[in-house]
Image (cartoon, rainbow, N blue to C red):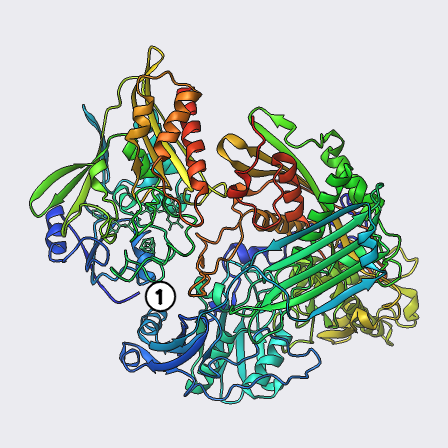
Amino acid sequence: MQAFQFMRANSIQHAIGAAAHASTAQQGASVRYVAGGTTLLDLMKLDVEYPQLVIDINRLPLGEVEHTATGLKIGALVRNADLAQHPVVKRDYPVLSEALLSGASGQLRNMATTSGNLLQRTRCMYFRDTAMACNKRQPGSGCAAIAGVNRMLAVLGTSEHCIATNPSDMNVALMALDASVVIHGLRGERQVPIGEFFVLPGGDPQRENVLEPGDLITHVLLPAPPAGTRSHYLKLRDRASYEFALASAAVAVQVVDGHIQHVRVALGGVGTRPWRSPEAEQALKGRAPNETAFTAAAEAALRDARPQSQNAFKIELARRCLRHALATATA
Amino acid sequence: MLTSNPSGMPFIGGRFARVDGPLKVTGRAEYSSDYNFPGLLYAVPVCATISTGKITHMDTSHAIKMPGVHEIFTRANIGPLQRVPKHNHGQMILDEHRPPLADDVIRYWGQYVAVVVADTFEQATAAARRVHVEYDAHTPDVRMAMTTGGKTDIDSHRGDTQTGFSTAPVKIDQTYSTPIETHNPIELHASVATWDGHNFTLYETTQSIMNHRRVMAAMLGVPVERMRIVMKFLGSGFGGKLWPWPHALLAAAAARNLERPIKLVVSRKMMFEDVGHRPNTQQRMRLGADHDGRLLSLQQDYLCSTAPNENNKEPCGEATPFLYSTPNLRVTGGLVRRDIAPSTAMRGPGAVPGLFAVESAMDELAVALDMDPVQLRQRNEPKIDESRNVPFSSRHMSECLSEGAKKFGWDKRNPKIGSMREGDTILGWGMASCAWMAARLPADVSVELHADNTARVLSATQDIGTGTYTVLAQLVAEYTGIPLDRITVDIGDSKLPPGPLSGGSMVTASVIPATKQAAEAALHQVMQAATQPGAAFAGTAMDELRVENGRVRRKGDAGNGRSLGSILADAHLDRVSGKGSSKSSSKDADADKLSFHSYGTHFVEVRWQPRIARLRVHRLVTMIDGGRIINERTARNQIEGAIVMGVGMALFEQTEYDARSGAPINSNLADYLVATHADQPALDVTFLDYPDYALNPLGARGVGEIGLAGVAPAIANAVYHATGVRVRQLPIRIEDLLQSRVSV
Ligand SMILES: Cc1cc2nc3c(=O)[nH]c(=O)nc-3n(C[C@H](O)[C@H](O)[C@H](O)COP(=O)(O)OP(=O)(O)OC[C@H]3O[C@@H](n4cnc5c(N)ncnc54)[C@H](O)[C@@H]3O)c2cc1C
Ligand code: SF4
C-alpha cells in the first residue's frame, strides 16, 4: 500500500467536488470513494489500486431503504447484510436477498455496501498481482489469464484483451429486477438502467462502467415487480460457502394461465459483466414453464459462450444452473 | 472401544479441557508475532518476480529514502550467513539449505532478494515495493505431469512383483496423482528477533524449538549456548513450521546488523512461496489378485517434484509395505526437478498422498473382483509386518473394518453405481483404511514439586495447538496426584531440558516415560524428606509409604496422611526437582522385533445432485486404533480437524502454478480453497483405545496425523459409487463429475 490522503465527505456535493479533478473514475483512479472498503482496501494493499485521495462517504445520508409508490429506493450505503434481511426485499425481491446471502461471509456482508458491491472488481488472479501482465490493470500489457489459470473466468462477453468475470452475486439479481442506478455527478443527477451501467471489455478492459470523475452513486432503484412474479437465485461453486460463483442464475418469472408472461434471466460467474440473457427470455416467453422450455432457454443463454483452456465446464454448469433456477422459481 | 475413562487412572483417558483454553479465548496467549520490545523495527522482504534466472541489477536508492526506512539488506550487506554442516547427524534439519541472499541466482518465484527494515510495517511494505530489481529470466519448468528418467530408489521390496503381477488373474494398473498443497495455518510464519551483542533470543513460529536453535546458531555463526528460541503458542503448523525458513534468518541477521529488535511476519502470499508445501505426486499402482481377492502382488512406483537444489522426498510408500498381506511387493520412489520452491513435510507426509493411491487402487480392485471393499481388506489383513518379518506391537485394523462398517450401516450398501437415492440426490458410499507411524523421540523432562502443593513440569518441547500443555499437566497429575489446576506447564523455551519436536505425531508418546521418571524422582525426594529424622514419617521405610491424591501415607493406613507440600515445608524445602530422560524408541531393546503403527478406517457418504452438479460430503464414520488415548477431547479434536482437512484435500486444495511465470497464482485464501464450516460433514469418530505398552508405560501412540490419511480415497471411492466417475487426480472437481452418466 502507498501513502494517501484521507478525507471525510460531509455532503454529496462535497464528495463530488473533491473527486471531480481525477482524470478517470475507472482502473487506477487517483481519487476513490470508500464505502465498506472490502474491495478497495484489499486492492490498495496489493498495489492494484493506488489512489492519492480516499474519500470516506460513510457519513452521507445514503443508508436507508425507502419503499415508494414505484418500488424500492436503496441507499448506496445500505449494508449487504441489512438489505438481504429487509422485509420488503425478502417478500418482493427474494432473488436479491438470496443473491446477497450467497456472497462473501457474514462479516464481509456487514461491511459491504450496495454501491461497493455494484463496483466490486474482478477476482482474476492476474489482475490482483502487479507482477503479471494484465490489460485491465495496465492497458496494453497483455492478458496473462488467456493462456494461464482461467478456470474461474468468463465464457460470455470476453474479448481477446480480457476475459475477467464480474464476480458480484448482487449484480446478477439486479439484472433480473430491471434495477437502475442513480448517479450524482458534476452535471447533476442521472439514472442509468443497470443493463447499460456495465460495459463490455472490448479493447478497453480498464473501463468497466459508465462512471466519470466525480460521479457518486447515491441509490439503486427497483421497480415494483409485476404481480405474482416469483424470483430465485441459484449459485453453484466448489465449496458450500464463501466462494465466488462458478455459475449462477437469477430469474424472475411471472406465470399467467399456465404461460410465462414476464421473465428476466441473468447469469453470474460466466460473463465479463453481470449477464442478462434476452435470448433465454425470448425462449421462455409465452411458453409453459416446463423442462423443455427451460432446456431451450439454457441452450439459448449459452449459445454464444466461448470457453478458455480451463473453463469449458462452466457452459454445461451454467445450463444446469439456469434450468434448475427456473424450475425452482416456477415450482 | 473408548467409553468414558477405561484406564482406571483418574487423569488418563478422560475428557479434559485444555489447560491453556482460557488464555486462548481471552486473547492472553502470546503468539510469536505478538512480542514487542522497545525499539522494535519491522522487516518486510522483497520477493523475486521470476522463477528461474539471475538478478542483474538492483536499485534501492529510492526506497532507502522513503519515510521511516532504516536499512535495506541485500546480498551486499546482509553479513555472514552460513550453510549448516553437511554431516550433522540429523541434528540440523531444514528444507531450504541455501542461506537467504547467498547469491544472485533465483530458483523459485517469490525467493527473497532483499529485506527492508523500517519503523512501521506499513513503511517497510511501501518501501519494499519501491526496490527496483532487474532480472535475466529463464523459462521455468513448473509442469505438474512428471516422467521418470532420473534414478528411482527402492523403498521396500519382497518377492517377485514382475511374475506376481503378470500371472495374476485380476489386475489393476492405474496412475494417481495429488497436487501441490500449501499449508495454510491461520497464524502466519513470523519471527521476532532480538540480539544483545552476544546472545540471540528469537521468538519463532516453530514446531521444533531445539532443532531451530541448532540450525539458527550454526547459520548465524554463534555457539548454541548463545541462541535461545521461544515459542509459547502456535496458531498451527501442519508440518510447515517444522524446520527453519529463510525469513527467520533475515530477521535474526537484521537484528544483529542493526542491534535492534526486528519483527518479520510473512504475508499470506509468501506463505505460498517461501515456507514450503506438500509436493505433487504421481503414483503408478499395479495390483494383482486371485479371484478370491487375495493380493498376489502390489507395486507402487511414485514420483514427486522437488526444488532444483533440494532432495526433499514425499515418501508415498510410508504405509504401503505393511498394510496388506502379499508375497510380492515393491515400492519405488523418484524425484523430478521443478523450478518450484523447496517442499516440506505436511501433515502425514508420504502416507497421506500415498494412501490416496493405494486405497483408490484397492477400491478399483474390489470393483474388478465384484467384491465388497471391506471384505477385500479383511481378506488381505496381514498377521505380521511382512516387510520386516516381525509382529505388530498392537494392530486392530480388522476391528476398525468390522466395527466401522457396523456403525456406518455398510451392510445396507447397494454396490451398483448410482443406485442409492433420496429424491433427486444420489448417495455414494465409500471407505478406505489408513495407517501412520508410531515412535518416540528422545525427551528430557523435569518435574518440580513445590511447598505450596503445586507442581511444575518443564521441557523444551512445544504445543502446536494439539494439546501438549494439557497432556503434560495430566501426566504430572496422574503421577503425583496434584490436581490439574495446581500444575504449571513450562514448555516452548529452548533453555528448558531438551524435549521432542512436534512432528510425526510423536510428542505424547515421547514425553510419557521421561515425565513418569521425573515425577517419580521428585516424589522420591519428598519421601526422603518425609522419612528424615524428626519428619512426619521418621523411622518409616520409604517403601512402606505411598502417594495418593498428592498426599503421603503409610501403606494400609486409613488416615489422611500428609500433603506433599507440607512435607517439603517441614523440611524447609521450597521445592524438589526430579529429572527424567528417555531415548528414542529406535534404541529400545525390542525396536527391531516389533512393528509400531496406528491404524484406522473411514466410511464416507457423499451426496451428489446431478441436476446442479453439486457434490457434498455428508457424513463420516471413522475408527482409530491409535493406542491408549490420553485425553479424549484433544484426541477427538485432532481426528475431526484432520478429517475436515481431508475433505479439503479430496475436493478443493491445489496450489496452481502459472505455466509461464512459475508463480503460485492462487496464493490467497479466497482462491486456494480449503473446507469451510459449511463443508464439514457429520463426524462420528471412535477410538479403539488398545494400549500399546511396547511403546511407553501408558501405551499411547499419537493421533495428530492419522485422521487425514485415508479420507481423500474414501471420498473418491464414494464419489465413484455415486457417479461412476473414477477420479485419479486430486482434487475431485465439478468438471470431472459433469462426465457422470448417472441421472435422476
Ligand atoms: C474474501 C471475499 C469474498 C467475497 N465473496 C463474494 C461473493 O461470494 N460474492 C460477491 O458478490 N461478493 C463477494 N465479495 C465482494 C464483496 O461483496 C465486495 O467487496 C463488497 O460488496 C464491496 O462493498 P464495499 O462497500 O466494501 O466497497 P468498497 O471497497 O468501499 O468500494 C468498492 C469500489 O466502489 C467504489 N464506490 C463505493 N461506493 C461508491 C459510490 N457510492 N459511488 C461511487 N463509487 C463508489 C469505491 O471507490 C471502490 O472503488 C467478497 C469479498 C471478499 C474480500
Ligand atoms: S482477464 Fe482481464 S483482468 Fe485478467 S489478466 Fe486478462 S486482462 Fe487482466
Q: x%, y% of residue B313?
A: 65, 68
| B486 over A280 or under it: above or below | below
Say which residue label 1 marks: A131
B619 sits left or right of B363 in the view:
left
| Residue situated furthest left in the rendering | A187
Q: Ligand 2: does it lie within 8 Å of the C-beta at label 1?
A: no
Residue B626 makes an appearance in the image? no
Q: Residue B483's image quarter?
A: bottom right
Residue B304 horizontal/vertical position (percent): 62, 63
Nearest the viewer among B490 and B401 is: B401
Chain holding disc 1:
A
Q: 10 Å neighbourhood of mark 1: few (<14), some, or many (≥20)? A: few
- Where disc 1 sits, the SS reads loop
Quadrant showing the N terminus of chain B: top right
| Left or right for B478, reference B677 | right
Name the one closer to the observer, A270 or A107: A270
Q: Amino acid at mark 1?
A: Ala
Q: Quadrant of residue B346?
A: bottom right
Position above or below: B501 against A218: below
Is A298 above or below relative to B617? above
Residue B582: x and y, percent? 79, 72
Q: Position of residue B350 (x, y in %)?
A: 67, 61
Q: Is residue B408 visible?
A: yes
Residue at position x 25%, y 45% in the image: A200
Quadrant location of ligand 2?
A: bottom left
Q: Image quadrant for the C terminus of chain B?
A: top right
Residue located farthest toward the top when viewing the structure as drawn: A257
The number of discs equals 1
